[in-house]
Amino acid sequence: MKKSFLWFCGALFASAVFGLNVHAQQTRPSAYAITNAQIVTVSGANISRGTIVVRDGLIEEVGASARVPADAVIIDGAGLTVYPGFFDANTSLGLAAPPTPRPGGQPAQAAQTTQPQSNSNYPDGLQPEESAIERLKAGEAQFETNRNAGFTTVLTVSREGVFNGQSAVINLAGETVSEMIIRPAFAEHFSFVTLRSGQYPTSLMGTFSALRQMLLDAQRLQENRKAYDKNPRGMRRPEADKSLDALLPILNRQMPIVFNANTEIEIVRALDLTKEFNLNAIISGGQEAAKVAGRLKAQNVPVLLSLNFPKRTTTASPEADAESLELLRRRAETPKTAGQLATAGIKFAFQSGGMTSISDFTTNANKAVENGLAKDAAIRAMTLSAAEILGVADRLGSIERGKIANLTVARGDIFNKDKTITHVFVDGKLFEQKEKPKTSTPTATPGGAQPAATANVGGNYSITIEIPGQSLAGTLSLTQQGETLTGNLQTQLGTTPIKDGKITAEGFTFTTTVEFGGSTFDLFVTGRVSGNDISGTMTSPQGAIPFRGTKTP
């Protein structure tokens, strides 16, 4: 996450609160009807020209001859395709950030309030009882970028610690937490990481050993409790331990455990542990899952497959160091994994894997198609297969009568870059897509005169971002090559590269990707330079704020 933007993005969200509240208070239609559209049901045959009726958050009718109710708002779907709402099967969307640690590891809030003592005997990071629901924030604005990309449902869980805690399946709509929840406690998540320096486990082998020991301890605790409940006399009563209690549903196969594992050795270790304790396991990430496809199939372990494919770690300039053979191999092989899992008969769903731009999701899904995955299988991995793995296929994942009205409507092939998401329904609520701010382009003057020359904007600028009630200082570094602009935006806490930079007669434009609360969105920047002075606006889907500054030597 680009921490330098958290304060800034929070202000953008706050500046939009009034407008969002007004929008939420508008009267919603009781019914919608999408007519004349191609319908990809996923669970059955496609309908080349049909109608979907949505009422009270549910799909009331679907079919080639479905009747349009008199009270329905009609959306002409000619030239459009309707899909079940897309799933992202592993995110941190909607979760409030944890308290910022003070020096020495103490959370900032700990100095102000006395927190209740936990009955866990394990340190932070090794506490599986943590829950996404406890940190889930309400509000629809935080999900706008993801909805605009066609996503309606996600699995959300913390990314911190060895045990990431219990995940939740949520819809990307609702002004209260209760409105968002589809499944409040889906699975326990475990990552092959180490804890901070000096705290066990400090190695990946230690991480694996810690999990195994905790499962054995939980197993022993359960056995002791059964014996104590049967005849407590003469027995020392078993201790209560919140962390071990959270592992009992996993040992009893009442809750899955999701192993965040990408490499072959991590996946093998997860499968070994799954077999030893007879766990209901899921692999998340799975970049090298095809190497152990036989074991995944034999043990009936599905995969939440990351579409965050390996990228170049060096620039493409002739002077750059050559990429390692291992990275070249992974870049070539990872897009083939989905097709290989499909061939092996392993159930899988797609997830974003922490990618910085959600637009890469369908781009990389298309790379999987180009590398052997059938297109309908790719769509299924974004819809019904995800719903099946997450245990919500009885209400989501396909377009069927009686299911929740989560729908994604698109113009053009969903895997093409030039596609347009035109409508998204979440829980039957229509979210209209917002257009990006339009920029002016030079045009020829009357009489055939040439357009004005482009502005000269290259250089380094000290800027102040005028957040309401406060200011954020930074540096804007711009490199101009003809009409192309590159560079970065820096604050005291980090640097964010700019992209799609263009020079115009009046100034410049560029975008940059911002992450806030687990959600990513594009920030659109326009500016102009006059002598040594620079000014402009930074616009997100939620609002705009000004910036200004001066050129530095």
Image (cartoon, rainbow, N blue to C red):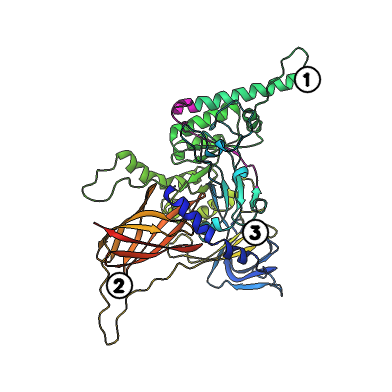
CB-based contact (under 8 Å), mark 3 and mark 1: no
* Highlighted range, magenta: 183-207
Helix, strand or loop: magenta stretch: loop
The residue to which callout 1 is attached is 230
Position of residue 403 in the picture relative to residue 76 (left or right) = right
Q: Are there few (<14), some (14-19), or many (20+) residues within 10 Å of tag 1?
A: few
The residue to which callout 2 is attached is 505
The quarter of the picture where residue 238 lies is top right
Specify the amino acid type for callout 3: Asp
Specify the amino acid type for callout 1: Lys
Q: CA distance from mark 3 to mark 1?
A: 48 Å
Q: Residue furthest left?
A: 319
Q: Toward the viewer: 343 or 327?
A: 327
Q: Secondary structure at mark 3?
A: loop
Q: Are there few (<14), some (14-19), or many (20+) residues within 10 Å of tag 3?
A: many
Is 200 a magenta residue? yes
**Residue 243's spot in the image, x, y percent?**
62, 30
Q: Considering only order in the chain, which callout, 2 or 3, is on the residue closer to the N terminus?
A: 3
Foreground: disc 3 or disc 2: 2
Q: CA distance from mark 2 to mark 1?
A: 84 Å
Position of residue 218 in the picture relative to residue 100 (left or right) = right
**Residue 193's spot in the image, x, y percent?**
47, 33
From the image, which quarter does the C terminus lie in?
A: bottom left
Q: Toward the viewer: 69 or 450?
A: 450
Q: What residue is rendered at 48% in x and 68% in y? A: 435
Q: Considering only order in the chain, which callout, 1 or 3, is on the residue closer to the N terminus?
A: 1
